[in-house]
């Protein structure tokens, strides 16, 4: 199995949790991030929100117009 790139089952099961950190799952999450006081004061936080929003749109997780 090593020559074929075998991935242990335990690693496959943990993948879904990673998606939640990289994408917004709902517009309510987007609104929550934008309404966070850091959004207006912290350019690093604002950039992270923008990246997450872009990733969500490009992945088709959210349909944002």
Image (spheres, rainbow, N blue to C red):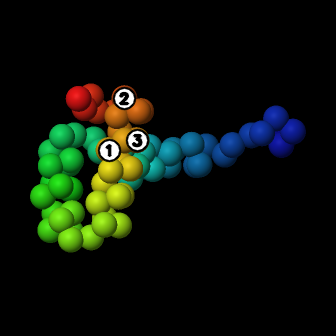
56 vs 18: above or below:
above
Residue appearing at x 28%, y 33% in the figure: 62
Asked whether residue 20 is in view, the answer is no
Residue appearing at x 50%, y 45% in the figure: 15
Instruction: Report which residue position mark 3 lands on.
Output: 55
Q: For the residues marked 1 and 3, what is the alpha-carbon distance in whole angstroms?
A: 5 Å
- Of the residues under marks 2 and 1, which one precedes in the sequence? 1
Contact (Cβ within 8 Å) of mark 1 with mark 3: yes
Q: Position of residue 8 (x, y in %)?
A: 66, 46
Instruction: Report crowding for label 1: few under 14, some 14 to 19, many 20 or more residues within 10 A (C-alpha).
Output: many
- Of the residues under marks 2 and 3, which one precedes in the sequence? 3
Q: For the residues marked 2 and 3, what is the alpha-carbon distance in whole angstroms?
A: 8 Å
Residue appearing at x 50%, y 49% in the figure: 14
Asked whether residue 4 is in view, the answer is yes
So how many labels did they put on this image?
A: 3
Q: Which secondary structure, mark 3?
A: helix
Left or right, 56 with respect to 27, comes to: right
Q: Position of residue 11 (x, y in %)?
A: 59, 48
Instruction: Report crowding for label 3: few under 14, some 14 to 19, many 20 or more residues within 10 A (C-alpha).
Output: some
Instruction: Report which residue position mark 1 lands on.
Output: 53
Q: Quadrant of the N terminus?
A: top right
50 vs 41: above or below:
above
Instruction: Report crowding for label 2: few under 14, some 14 to 19, many 20 or more residues within 10 A (C-alpha).
Output: few
Q: Quadrant of residue 24?
A: top left
In-front residue for pair 51/5: 51
Q: Position of residue 55 (x, y in %)?
A: 40, 41
Residue appearing at x 32%, y 44% in the figure: 53
Instruction: Report which residue position mark 2 lands on.
Output: 60
């Amino acid at each position: 199995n090593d020559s074929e790139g075998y991935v242990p089952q335990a690693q496959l099961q943990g993948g879904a949790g990673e998606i939640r950190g990289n994408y917004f799952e709902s517009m309510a999450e987007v609104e929550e991030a934008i309404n966070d006081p850091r959004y207006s004061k912290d350019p690093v936080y604002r950039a992270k929100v923008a990246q997450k929003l872009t990733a969500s749109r490009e992945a088709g997780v959210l349909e944002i117009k």
